[in-house]
């Protein structure tokens, strides 16, 4: 092969890496508006994950953030009403991947907490915990290949 052919393949290879790299950055910065309505009740799973009982969509609260899986992507928000951002799978806590598909049936007998009461008691303490954890990494591990 001559040098110009190597140069061409090198250019194509570098262009692909740059495109993939920029596409990943752009995806991480996307804000999404998700209209999921106001919750009435929250239910805690034994793993410490809360879910919105009275919703037709899968909305979870764990480790100070709201999590919403949809169409193969995960979204995260600091508040229930957003703003929501796309999160790469390796930044989704591993416990969320272990939630059973039929979690509403599995945890139907768990205690239900009025959202207003939950928000005033639990939601506030988690905000303080999250601020403290910003100093270090979460020790539970991350998601990824599941």
Image (spheres, rainbow, N blue to C red):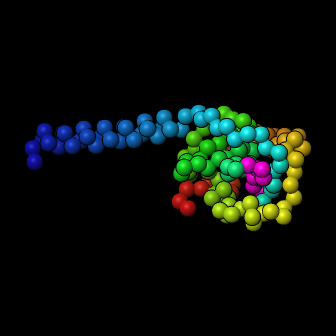
Please, is residue 73 above or below residue 97 in the view?
A: above
x 78%, y 60%: residue: 45
Count the labels in the image: 0
Q: Nearer the viewer, residue 41 or 62?
A: 41
Task: Give the magenta range.
Answer: 46-55
The C terminus sits in image quarter: bottom right
Do we see residue 122 in this rendering? Answer: no
Q: Nearer the viewer, residue 107 or 129?
A: 107
Please, is residue 64 above or below residue 45 in the view?
A: above
Q: Determine the residue located farthest toward the bottom in the rendered image.
A: 106
Tell whether position 24 is magenta: no
x 88%, y 47%: residue: 114
- Residue 73: image location, x then y, percent: 55, 48
Left or right relative to 125: residue 3 = left
Left or right relative to 136: residue 72 = left
- Residue 27: image location, x then y, percent: 50, 38
x 59%, y 56%: residue: 143
């Amino acid at each position: 092969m001559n040098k110009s052919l190597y140069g061409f393949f090198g250019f194509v290879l570098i262009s692909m890496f740059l495109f993939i790299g920029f596409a990943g950055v752009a995806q991480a910065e996307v804000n999404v508006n998700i209209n999921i309505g106001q919750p009435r009740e929250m239910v805690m799973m034994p793993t410490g994950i809360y879910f919105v009982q009275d919703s037709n969509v899968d909305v979870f609260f764990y480790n100070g953030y709201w999590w919403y899986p949809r169409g193969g992507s995960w979204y995260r928000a600091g508040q229930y009403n957003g703003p929501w951002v796309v999160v790469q799978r390796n930044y989704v806590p591993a416990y969320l991947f272990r939630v059973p598909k039929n979690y509403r049936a599995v945890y139907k007998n768990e205690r239900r907490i009025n959202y207003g009461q939950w928000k005033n008691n639990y939601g506030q303490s988690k905000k303080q915990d999250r601020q403290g954890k910003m100093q270090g990494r979460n020790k539970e591990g991350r998601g990824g290949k599941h």
